Amino acid sequence: MEQNERIRCLIIGSGPAGYTAAIYASRANLSPVLYEGMQPGGQLTTTSEVENFPGYPEGISGMDMMEDLKKQAARFGADIRRGIATAADFSTHPYRITIEGEKVVEADTVIISTGASAKYLGLPDEAKYAGLGVSACATCDGFFYRKKIVAVVGGGDTACEEAEYLSHLASKVYLIVRKNYLRASNIMQKRVFDNPNIEILFETQTEGLFGENGVEGAHLVKGKGTDHEERYDLPIDGFFLAIGHKPNTDIFKGSIELDENGYIVTRPYTTETNVPGVFAAGDVADPRYRQAITAAASGCKAAIDAERYLVNNNL
Ligand SMILES: Cc1cc2nc3c(=O)[nH]c(=O)nc-3n(C[C@H](O)[C@H](O)[C@H](O)COP(=O)(O)OP(=O)(O)OC[C@H]3O[C@@H](n4cnc5c(N)ncnc54)[C@H](O)[C@@H]3O)c2cc1C
């Protein structure tokens, strides 16, 4: 009978958090094994230019940056493998993680860095104009829309924050809200209502986008299904989604503490989860910042936390 493989430090995910954890863990002699998952390199492989990651004064393509991080992790001996984790059992130690429904690896420590995915409306045009005017991150892409006209979709706190952030860069920001009210907290509502650069389009939905080589406008409908239904085209240069993110934590449900939105809960100032020896890094545990640099930083912290756990438990 085939023996399960025993690993000291298992890293799940190959975004900035996972690779940074792998760099630190391999340099600390933890012989980490990293499974890349369905999106080797993570979210940044879907963007053309990253301009805010320190150390690249001219900017760098997301693909090249993640290739650099992978090489750096491999240089110190991290064992980087293709494969998706499909189940996790944290009920007994060593922890048992199933890969692709078949192979089971036993791990003394696990670093979960499976990221989060932005939610989209589901319009074909969102994919068509990805990187050509459609974005789910104002902090990442707002700079490209200085003095331009943008729209933000959503009515919650995040949408208001994104609209507020963009209002300091863009010449005009439309906030497209499906309902006839904002779900955001009172303070955020006040900020957008008081901001002369933000115009709220209530009861409005997006039906599509148009433009030759990038977004030039959105097809909107106001009061859909009512007797005052009205369709019109709104000229815009950028279309920002702010309708939430979905952390990739489905396989951990029931075995680790998650918050009400599915993010892994970590102990303040650490990457520790409620399961000793299981750590979480990057967007999967971060509903707030969701940046490459913050993900990388928490990957570093997770590797240090894993190393201390192994030492403290004589593993
Ligand atoms: C289009 C776009 C542009 C962006 N631009 C910028 C920018 O300019 N600057 C910036 O700082 N941030 C930017 N971001 C945000 C940034 O990409 C994220 O904050 C960052 O990638 C999060 O890193 P992470 O390691 O937590 O997760 P991710 O990059 O999301 O990586 C998650 C990894 O987990 C893997 N995974 C998931 N589930 C499993 C599983 N079950 N088993 C194994 N592996 C699994 C995936 O394959 C992937 O490799 C951008 C995001 C997008 C989508």
Image (cartoon, helix red, strand yellow):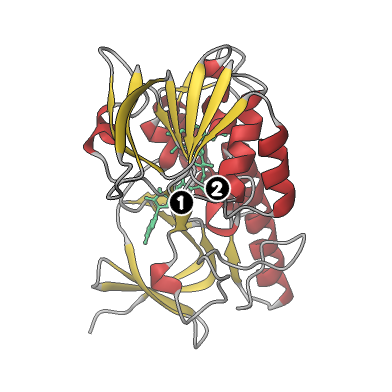
Counting residues from the start of the chain, the first of labels 1 and 2 encountered is 2
Tell me the element at label 1: loop
Rendered residue at 69%/62% (across/down): 305
- Residue 62 in the image, given as x and y percentages of width and height: 44, 28
Residue behind mark 1: 179
- Residue 140 in the image, given as x and y percentages of width and height: 55, 30
Residue 17, numbered label = 2
Which image quadrant: the C terminus?
A: bottom right
Q: Residue furthest front?
A: 227
Q: Is label 2 within 8 A of ligand 1 (CB to nearest ligand atom)?
A: yes
In the image, residue 264 above or below residue 36: below
Which image quadrant: the N terminus?
A: bottom left
Kind of residue sitting beneath label 2: Ala
Tell me the element at label 2: helix
Q: How many marks?
A: 2
Rendered residue at 71%/53% (across/down): 186
Classify residue 47 as left or right of residue 190: left
In the image, residue 33 above or below residue 103: above
Disc 1 or disc 2, which is closer to the eye?
Answer: 1
Classify residue 105 as left or right of residue 299: left
Kind of residue sitting beneath label 1: Lys
